[in-house]
Image (cartoon, rainbow, N blue to C red):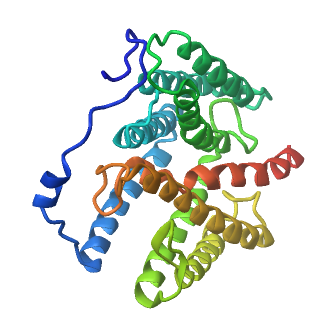
Amino acid sequence: MTPDTLAADEPSLPAASTSPAAAAAAPAVTPSKRAVFRRRLGSALFLWAIFAGTVISGSEFCYYALIGALGLVGLWEFYKMLDARRLPNFKLFGLTVGTLFFLGSFWFHYTRPGQPFDFELLAVLAFLFGTFGRQLFVRTRDHSPIETMAYTLFGLLYVPLLFNFITKLIYLPAHAAHHPVGHFYVFYLIAVSKFSDMGAYLVGSLIGRHKMIPHISPSKTWEGFAGALLFSVGISYGLRALMPARLGLLGWVDCAVMGLTLSVAAVIGDLAESIIKRSTGVKDSGHTFPGIGGVLDLIDSLLFTAPILYFYLRPIAEATR
């Protein structure tokens, strides 16, 4: 069955992958932990350089280009994972709606900075109505319509909707029109989330003995989880000490609360993607970043931490206006 296109009224159901015999003919080579760490470090430095350049530029268009690109590639990788397991989905429809969502979010925040509007609720309704509408034009009935709609809709809720909270963070603190200052809180978010990943990886690799949830992620340990908490709280306090004016909405108690909470959320976000990967039979969502995997592997923790930081800071920001 052919993949989903705007002209074809069928869900994406790719052909079967390489035969088991062919796969078995090429033995897998497992890289050492040191090699994996070097690759992850190189990818991390490259990504931090891109983000630092975006922050220094101060350009709203650069923010949205980066957020939109990562969000859409992450959504595409999600649908490709479904394809690997031959799970029906409207991939092109989902990517089109996701693109319109990011463009709509940019237009709203750029033209109406600081003004309240239930954009996300409107987007969820558009996702829901659009997915049902797309199903009406499918002529074949050799698959479950509710499965196709559910997989497509879940991808839209899981990636674009959650990832777009980074956009909302940029515009959360009080600012002059077209001069948002919330990117420092995005920097804080990414640092705390990724230091959680780093702490879990380093401590877990060195002294990890007790498996955390082996049926979902065999490599994660409780020792690594403790390392994630320590690293997150440490960078939370460190950034607050280095940028007290830029992170003025966060007090010292807030740093402890957010350091711990965002670390837990980051671990849950990573485990959530592990559930998806295990369910679809893939190791990584892609191969974009050596040592990390795909874009979805990169942003999985941010999908859970961004909404938490936004809703924590929102009442504080409103009280200071």
Residue at coordinates 59% horizontally, 48% vertically from top-left?
183
Quadrant the N terminus occupies: top left
- What is the residue that sits farthest to the left in this orientation? 25
What residue is rendered at 28% in x and 59% in y? 290
Residue 173 placed where, x, y %? 73, 45
Residue 227 quadrant: bottom right
Image: 225 above or below 193: below
Identify whether 109 is placed above or below 160: above
Asked whether residue 243 appears in the rendered view, the answer is yes
Extreme-front residue of the structure: 142
For the C terminus, the quadrant is: top right
The answer to whether residue 292 is above or below residue 233 is above
The quadrant holding residue 23 is: bottom left
Q: Locate residue 167: give its quadrant.
A: top right
> Residue at point 67% right, 70% down?
259
Residue 172 placement (x, y as % from top left): 72, 42
- Can residue 185 be seen here? no
Q: Position of residue 243 (x, y in %)?
A: 63, 64
- Side of 250 where 170 appears, left or right: left
Query: What residue is rendered at 18% in x and 47% in y?
Result: 19
x and y, in percent, of residue 140 in the image: 44, 14
Outermost residue on the right side: it is 319
Q: Nearer the viewer, residue 257 or 82?
A: 82
